[in-house]
Image (cartoon, rainbow, N blue to C red):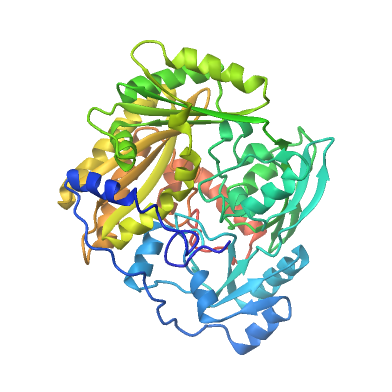
Amino acid sequence: MRSKWWGWGDPDTRYPEQMLPRTLAYLESLGIRFTEPRDEPQPPALPPTALTETDREALAAVCEIGTGEEERLVHSLGKSYLDLLSAWKGELERVTDAVAYPRAAREVATLLRVAAAHGVAIVPFGGGTSVLGGVSPVRGVHYAALTVDLRRLNRVLEVDEDSGLVRVESGIAGPDLEAALADHGLTLGHYPQSFHFSTLGGWIATRSAGHASGTYGRMENLVQALTVITPAGEVKTTEAPARSTGPELKHLLLGSEGRLGIVVEAVIRAHPAPEVTAGRGFLLPSFPQALDRCRGMIRGGIRPATVRVSNTEETRALMASRGLKSQDAGSFVLLEFRGSAERVPEEMDRAIAHWTEGRVWDLGGEAASGWEEEYYRAPYLRDELLARGLFVETLETATSWSNLETLYGGVKEALEEAFRAGGTPGAVLCHLSHAYRDGASLYFTLLTTRTPGEERTQWEAVKTAATETLLDLGGTLSHHHGIGMDHRRWMEREHGPVGIRALRALKGALDPKGIMNPGKAWEDSI
């Protein structure tokens, strides 16, 4: 399913009308101002393609090439705050020059050879759901940019039910992949918030994590082998379950965000489809207490597929959207288990016993019902808030359990200070989104009023304050969103100068002319 160019998802889907006024009233109670909603933006006029006729003919000899304004527009924006802000303002900073639609790996390989020979940058495109500028058509030193839409590489090629391995082309969308696996009683179990619009290749390129990763794992746990087409040739990793043959090349390609090549095929580890799914909600007096209780659960061996622990601000917002009183809300906790009809009730009983010790409110299964629907429709709320003049951004990180509360408090304080410095009251919503034996992730949602005419400056101030603080306090730059353009400037702090030199050297070996997704993930050498 193609997402609308100026916002999230299906053009015919809106955030529920009965919930929106409650959310707006809650924001108003915090002093956050908003305007009457604007009509959706109209497509701006685009500059003509920079591709010469000779180069267009050379590329069109490989596969279908489109240069129409609508398809160029759709492929020029992702779903980052800056992407959508530029759509609302009608000021697109970059526009792709053409869109290629390969149908086979050999066409991808030929496209890269032709592009390198003609000085054209390549921008891989799956579902276009990057929230960090990952699909922006940056040309770099090249005279034109070609977006390569991979969604015609969408076949399930082989199902090995004995091994639980499935060979799949990378352009397949989440719902199509799950439907194909369901025919064999299997699931990948990977459900990012972008699930309905993103692709397997995009998940691999960003080291994605879905909400059920407590049971099924992140993408690096789900990928057995990769086939990647690079400008230097094909790289294909082994399907062996384990090996001791030097550094694992697969892990250098995972998360490379199209900078080294294009993922065209993957062998993935499928799981038996769950017989039972069961959820439960709890309310604790405070966020620190809930974090500590969550740590005890995970380290005690209880591993839900999904765990979410909301801070007080997010808990109040959740309750307000449902028309519930939000004073002294505490911390809402959601658990979900997936698996066999025998195991899930046992796991749930253990979890209930763990969470209901002391001053805790057991909200029952009803509190968890419908949460996944809300999870998928939340981005539609962002569209409604953007239309009303609000700043809406997210950031996420991860750290060890011992550092989690310090990291949370420091980032929250930095964000609140940035809002005060900008003269606009704001809200910092946060939840623990993924939990591991040694630590967990934190997902922040930031809300305030946009500053007209200074939107980019406002974003830079807030983004810089939060990112510098989380790095100072030992958090990672990103837990599952990736790097794109928005995080690139901090990659040397994440990996160190020697690490960045190693990544540049790898890129030089696989992409000697530097055509692959310029301007993303890490700075190139000059």
Most extreme residue toward the top is 358
Q: Nearer the viewer, residue 272 or 254?
A: 272
Q: Work out whether residue 325 or residue 513 is closer to the camera in this orientation and state it.
A: 325
Residue 139 visible: no
Q: Residue at x 63, y 45 (%)?
A: 252
Q: Position of residue 462 (x, y in %)?
A: 28, 49
Location of the N terminus by quadrant is: bottom right
Q: Residue at x 28, y 51 (%)?
A: 21
Q: Nearer the viewer, residue 174 or 373?
A: 373
**Image height of 380 relative to 340, above or below:** below
Could you tell whether 65 is left or right of 436 in the image?
Answer: right
What x and y, as percent, mark residue 369?
48, 35
- Outermost residue toward the bottom in this view: 53
Q: Is residue 260 visible?
A: yes
User: Does residue 391 sit above or below 411 in this rendering?
Assistant: below
Callout count: 0
Who is closer to the viewer here, 37 or 62?
37
Q: Quadrant of residue 199?
A: bottom right
Q: Give the residue at x 64% y 49%.
A: 253
Above or below, comparing residue 71 to residue 272 in the picture = below
Q: Position of residue 223 (x, y in %)?
A: 69, 42
